[in-house]
Image (spheres, grey):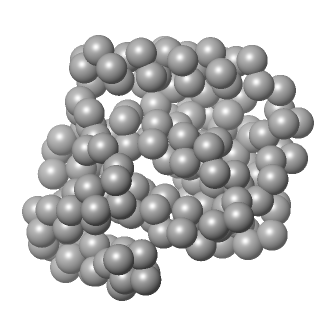
Amino acid sequence: YEEKLPCLSYLIKCQAYCGKVSDAKRIAFTVLERLGEAPPREIGEPSLNVDMNSTVKMLQNTPDHFILKMKASPSSQQNILLLEIYYALMQILLELGNPKKMPDVALKMLETTMKHGYCALSPLAFAVFSTTLAQLGHNSLAYRISKLAKKLVNRPLSQRYASGVAMTTAVRVDWIVEPIQIVAENL
């Protein structure tokens, strides 16, 4: 099944871009299930609250240099595909007007990076999770993770995600802490 992941990842994106968002969501959920991933939970589910709180504490206690020097994942290509599927699912949920599952998808993206190691899409995982932190009111931690995401795009193969990281963090996190003019200048 894993050899089909690249095709399935593109199929999800193509379905979403062609306006078949419900089909894209169904395929994404099916792929994640086949990979042994739990379906995204909604805000308010006790298990999500526990996992979110433990991740916040972990990030608060993790020094920047640890994240910046994270070792590459031995299964980098597979992690990239998994993160691409999660990222596409975030966009699909947003388009469907179902943002209640987005924090868990962001959490799963970050957990994939922290568990398996760095891959090219890891900066985007940190950027997306920083937006979730901001939504939960952890503004200083969100800003710290946002800045780390922007530093991580300088690693090999991650530069292609620099614009996604910049837009995600500027629009949803940086403006909370920085004056708007500085945010605009950094885009």
Residue 157 or residue 143, whichever sits in front: 157
Above or below: residue 54 compared with residue 24: above
Residue 180 at x, y percent in the picture: 62, 34
Would residue 27 be visible to someone looking at this image? yes
- From what the image shows, is residue 17 above or below residue 126? below
- Name the residue rendered at 42%, 57% in the picture: 87
Q: Nearer the viewer, residue 103 or 49?
A: 49
Is 134 or 51 nearer to us in this picture? 51
Residue 176 seen by the camera = no
Q: Quadrant of residue 49?
A: top left
Residue 128 place in picture, x, y as percent: 51, 44
Q: Residue at x 31, y 58 (%)?
A: 32
The structure residue drawn at horizontal position 75% and vertical position 18%, both measured from the top left corner, is 61
Is 8 situated left or right of 136 in this image? Answer: left
User: With 47 as the anchor, is 112 left or right in this view?
Assistant: right
Query: Residue visible at 42% across and 15% down?
Result: 50
The quadrant where residue 176 appears: top right
Q: Nearer the viewer, residue 3 or 148?
A: 3
Is 76 situated above or below 52? below
In the image, taking residue 152 as reference, residue 168 lies left or right, namely left
Rendered-image quadrant of the C terminus: bottom right
Placement of the N terminus among the 4 image quadrants? bottom left
Residue 72, percent from left and from top: 76, 59
Name above or below for residue 82 compared with residue 56: below
